[in-house]
């Protein structure tokens, strides 16, 4: 009997591709494949050259996503995807791993002749949102989870409008939702990605299965006290907005009680921000995440209660403004089981993890396509940085598992 992947899957080829793309798109500070830039376009040109060696049809949809379609006996389509864009000074594996592993899977499938169902690889445009602050843009527009009107007025730091940057790469923002038809025949979506956390490394596993993505509640909090002269004003009469904010930050952390909770205050702004003034205004952004909807609501409630208490004790006003939220998304239970089984068969072990970070898979799952993700062990859990790395063994295990899972999903889809 032939091994489950056949002789033609070659993880070393995927590794060589990853290194070649890294070479082309990295400088001394890291990867520079920021979406809607020349380096990103060059990365895609390189990908197109690789795809041109295969019997696949390549084109770009109305939302800027690059598709390579290996036609099968049936139109029913198994999708593989991720993104080649990166953050500025990013790593070599975030996104590219899934795309180039998918490329290797396409190669192996194509070498075996016409598959029973169609298989498509998609490179989603602008997963990172690095330039315009809107993550999952290409997948969100294509799946209908992002409304073009909600991003129409967005500009980058240099005042370039998003709508113009997209147009420069051939994307008409208003037409983007038409890309939705690409998903009409999709029966499954599979995405391989680096873990971006330390769990697999800690548990000495190369590959794990993602059960879903966490829900997110992001609020801007504005605290108003009274700016006064710091040298003169007595301590007990102050209404110090930053002291109130600092207390709130600790309560945000305290409300993240279980091991699946995440809570971050990553931005804080103080005015007037001079050494001799008691801060009169403090603004901070709270990002809370949990895979359980009720527990996420509880976390948010605890922080609101803490803010109300601090407002009284510090005699400040506290206002919350919700700037973004997304519900937790559970991936397809049957695909999660199948991925778990496959990872065990291919690598000798597996774990079920949830993803605190969002991925294009969340857009696809939200659009109703049965979805699952595989995570590959990440060295020290570092991502979005030049130091991002995974061992060649872990990368190879990820490629093998994705290939084996794709074959199993094709077989299931072929049976109807
Ligand atoms: Zn990514």
Image (spheres, helix red, strand yellow):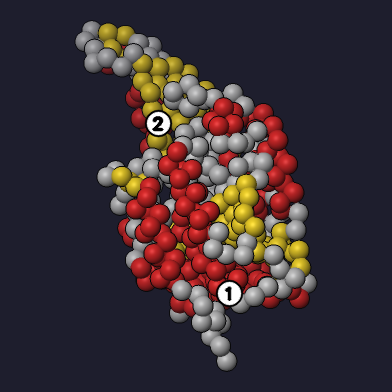
Residue 368 lies in what quarter of the image?
A: bottom right
Percent position of residue 102, x then y:
54, 63
- Residue shown at 42%/61% (left/top)? 17
In terms of sequence position, does the residue under pointer 1 or pointer 2 come before the other?
1
Is label 2 in a helix, a strand or a loop? strand
Mark 2: give few (<14), some (14-19) or many (20+) Cα within 10 Å. Answer: few
On the question of residue 322 being in view, the answer is no
- Residue shown at 69%/32% (left/top)? 174
Q: Is mark 1 within 8 Å of ligand 1?
A: no
- Residue shown at 40%/54% (left/top)? 21
Mark pair 1, 2: CA separation: 50 Å
Q: How many marks?
A: 2
Mark 1: give few (<14), some (14-19) or many (20+) Cα within 10 Å. Answer: some
Is label 1 in a helix, a strand or a loop? helix
On the question of residue 22 being in view, the answer is yes
Farthest residue to the left: give it: 231
Which label sits in the foreground, 1 or 2?
Answer: 1
Image quarter where the C terminus lies is bottom right
Farthest residue to the bottom: give it: 1
Relative to residue 306, is residue 407 drawn left or right?
right
Indicate whether 22 appears above or below 136: below
Percent position of residue 232, x then y:
23, 7
Where is mark 1, residue-wise? 111
In the rendering, which numbered label is found on residue 45? Answer: none
Percent position of residue 251, x then y:
42, 37
Relative to residue 366, is residue 314 drawn left or right?
left
Where is mark 2, residue-wise? 267
Indicate whether 140 appears above or below 15: above
- Residue shown at 57%/64% (left/top)? 54
For this rendering, which residue is in front, 60 or 147? 60
For this rendering, which residue is in front, 7 or 264? 7
For this rendering, which residue is in front, 218 or 401? 401
């Amino acid at each position: 009997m032939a091994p489950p992947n056949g002789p033609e899957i070659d993880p070393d080829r995927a590794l060589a591709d990853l290194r070649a793309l890294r070479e082309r798109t990295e400088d001394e500070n890291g990867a520079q494949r920021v979406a809607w830039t020349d380096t990103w376009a060059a990365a895609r040109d390189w990908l197109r050259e690789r795809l041109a060696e295969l019997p696949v049809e390549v084109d770009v949809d109305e939302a800027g996503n690059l598709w390579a379609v290996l036609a099968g006996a049936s139109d029913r389509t198994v999708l593989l995807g991720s993104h080649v864009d990166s953050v500025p000074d990013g790593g070599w594996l975030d996104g590219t791993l899934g795309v180039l592993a998918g490329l290797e899977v396409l190669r192996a499938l194509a070498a075996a002749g016409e598959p029973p169902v169609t298989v498509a690889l998609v490179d989603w445009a602008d997963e990172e949102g690095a330039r315009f602050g809107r993550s999952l843009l290409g997948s969100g527009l294509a799946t209908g989870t992002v409304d073009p009107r909600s991003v129409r007025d967005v500009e980058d730091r240099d005042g370039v409008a998003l709508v113009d940057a997209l147009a420069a790469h051939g994307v008409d923002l208003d037409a983007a939702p038409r890309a939705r038809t690409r998903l009409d025949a999709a029966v499954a979506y599979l995405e391989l990605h680096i873990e971006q956390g330390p769990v697999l490394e800690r548990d000495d596993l190369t590959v794990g299965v993602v059960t879903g993505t966490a829900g997110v509640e992001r609020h801007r909090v504005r605290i108003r006290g009274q700016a006064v002269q710091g040298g003169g004003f007595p301590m007990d009469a102050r209404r110090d907005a930053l002291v109130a904010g600092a207390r709130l930050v600790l309560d945000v952390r305290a409300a993240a009680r279980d091991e699946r909770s995440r809570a971050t205050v990553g931005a804080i702004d103080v005015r007037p921000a001079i050494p001799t003034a008691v801060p009169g205004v403090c603004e901070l952004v709270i990002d809370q995440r949990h895979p359980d909807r009720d527990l996420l609501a509880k976390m948010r409630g605890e922080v609101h209660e803490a803010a109300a208490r601090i407002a009284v004790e510090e005699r400040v006003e506290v206002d919350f403004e919700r700037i973004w939220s997304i519900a937790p998304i559970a991936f397809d239970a049957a695909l999660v089981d199948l991925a778990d089984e496959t990872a065990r068969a291919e690598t000798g072990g597996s774990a079920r993890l949830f993803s605190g970070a969002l991925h294009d898979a969340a857009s696809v799952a939200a659009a109703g396509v049965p979805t699952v993700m595989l995570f590959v062990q990440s060295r020290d859990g570092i991502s979005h940085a030049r130091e991002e790395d995974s061992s060649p063994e872990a990368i190879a295990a990820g490629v093998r598992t994705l290939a084996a899972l794709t074959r199993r999903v094709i077989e299931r889809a072929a049976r109807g």
